[in-house]
Image (spheres, rainbow, N blue to C red):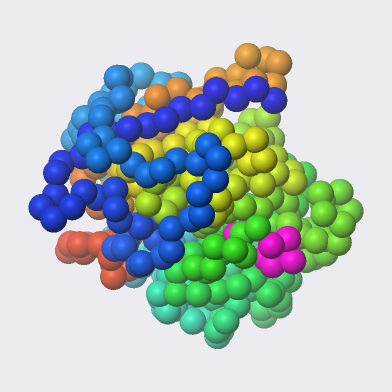
């Protein structure tokens, strides 16, 4: 598959005492002192000391403004306020305008609707909301709409569990479908997405241990693929293993496009954040390569941001040849247009930025009515929380 890759260099204001390119992109927060990756042929050597503005990339607009692209946000409204460190949105099957939202630190799930109503649903037992861990992703199984899956930190491991959700906000018993995912105070991954093949895809972080990303016997720093039962599919690339791809630092966004391709957004360290096109069995390079490195043994991202302060990408949504990336440190919604030539080649156009007025953004999900719902994330201890945080924003998309 031929891929045209896009490097995004965004102008940054000088900061007294050093540039923001020296900060580690650890869930979009302050530097954590993580070790630098070993050098590798073709690997980036760091962000330029004075990043330049790529031609065609707009300066920060008031949100939203019209920009070129297949799908563009044309209006934004606040529909829910008062959430506590929300992490993931999943729309309730068959219930128009209703969605479940996880609250990371509390380990709770709430039901929200377009009228702004917030209804407590319940807690996931045993959740450890320390650092970047807690109650993270959730997803309904399209083939069994009452089955709800959650990704949660429980002590030294992250666990995928299944429960049932009944109309009216009732959770059933929880059962473990996948455990043994390393957990830490940072880099816990946590996104869940069902693919068009009916399989559950799970993103994991390397929990602050970069070598885990290259260890095929370790579930950290991977994208995993399992059956809804938790069994390993027979056609996974590594016999008997849930590992689908490896060499990841911290993937927090997963989205499938109209052709069934899987895209993932990934936190870099000090050099570059990434959007990757995910292909079975591939090695995405961490900790040996960060961003577009051109090293022959690793798969490069399709899009990268330098410096990491411009993105720290978390949730990822796809709609009509367009990716939307929720950025934490970048505090904006990135629009990434995609195009294909009909022969399997896919290209990414220049990203444009929207929703710059609401602080940190954690998730972006396309609603059944075609609008885009976006979670803010200013109450997680790293943002500047304002009255009403955290919020669900609804964006109208055009065309």
Q: Is residue 123 visible?
A: no
Looking at the image, residue 70 lies above or below residue 87: above
Image location of residue 154, percent across then percent down: 56, 81
* Quarter of image, res 205: bottom right
Residue 220 included in the magenta stretch of the image: yes
- Relative to 148, say whether 223 is above or below: above
Residue at screen point 43% across, 63% down? 35
Judging depth in this view, the residue of 264 and 19 nearest the camera is 19
Task: Give percent across and percent down for residue 229.
Answer: 79, 65
Most distant residue in the left direction: 16
Identify the residue at image location x=47%, y=59%: 88
Q: Is residue 14 left or right of residue 239?
A: left
Task: State left or right for residue 261 relative to residue 168.
Answer: right
Q: Is residue 129 visible?
A: yes
Residue shown at the point (71%, 16%) measured from the top left: 343
Residue 367 on the magenta span = no
Q: Is residue 55 left or right of residue 7?
A: left
Residue at left offset 86%, top offset 49%:
235
The N terminus sits in image quarter? top right
* Residue 383 falls left or right of residue 205: left
Q: Quadrant of the C terminus?
A: top left
What span is colored magenta in the figure? Answer: 215-223
Q: In x, y percent, where is residue 82?
A: 28, 66
Q: Position of residue 336 (x, y in %)?
A: 44, 30
Please tell me which residue lies in front, 108 or 251. 251
Q: How many marks?
A: 0
């Amino acid at each position: 598959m031929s891929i045209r890759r896009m490097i995004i260099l965004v102008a940054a204001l000088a900061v007294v005492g050093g540039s923001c390119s020296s900060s580690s992109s650890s869930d979009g927060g302050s530097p954590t002192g993580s070790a630098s990756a070993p050098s590798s042929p073709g690997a980036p050597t760091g962000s330029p000391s004075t990043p330049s503005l790529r031609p065609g990339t707009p300066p920060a607009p008031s949100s939203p403004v019209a920009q070129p692209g297949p799908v563009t946000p044309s209006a934004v409204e606040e529909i829910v306020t008062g959430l506590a460190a929300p992490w993931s949105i999943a729309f309730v099957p068959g219930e128009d305008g209703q969605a479940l939202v996880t609250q990371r630190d509390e380990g709770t799930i709430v039901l929200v609707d377009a009228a702004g109503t917030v209804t407590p649903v319940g807690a996931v037992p045993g959740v450890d909301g320390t650092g970047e861990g807690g109650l993270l992703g959730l997803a309904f199984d399209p083939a069994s709409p009452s089955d709800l899956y959650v990704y949660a930190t429980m002590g030294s491991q992250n666990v995928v569990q299944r429960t049932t959700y009944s109309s009216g906000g009732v959770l059933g018993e929880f059962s473990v479908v996948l455990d043994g995912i390393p957990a830490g105070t940072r880099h816990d991954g946590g996104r869940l997405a069902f693919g068009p093949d009916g399989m559950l895809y799970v993103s994991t972080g390397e929990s602050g241990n970069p070598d885990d990303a290259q260890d095929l016997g370790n579930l950290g720093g991977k994208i995993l693929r399992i059956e809804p039962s938790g069994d390993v599919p027979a056609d996974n690339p590594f016999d008997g293993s849930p590992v689908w791809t490896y060499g990841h630092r911290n993937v927090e966004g997963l989205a499938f496009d109209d052709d069934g391709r899987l895209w993932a957004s990934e936190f870099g360290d000090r050099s570059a954040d990434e959007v990757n096109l995910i292909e079975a069995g591939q090695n995405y390079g961490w900790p040996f390569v960060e961003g577009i490195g051109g090293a022959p043994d690793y798969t490069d991202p399709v899009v990268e941001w330098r410096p990491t302060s411009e993105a720290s990408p978390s949730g990822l949504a796809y709609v009509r040849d367009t990716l939307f990336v929720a950025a934490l440190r970048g505090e904006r919604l990135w629009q990434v247009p995609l195009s294909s030539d009909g022969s399997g080649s896919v290209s990414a156009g220049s990203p444009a930025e929207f929703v710059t007025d609401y602080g940190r953004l954690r998730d972006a999900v396309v609603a059944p009515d075609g609008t885009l719902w976006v979670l803010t994330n200013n109450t997680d201890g790293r943002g500047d929380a304002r009255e009403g945080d955290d919020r669900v924003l609804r964006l109208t998309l055009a065309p």
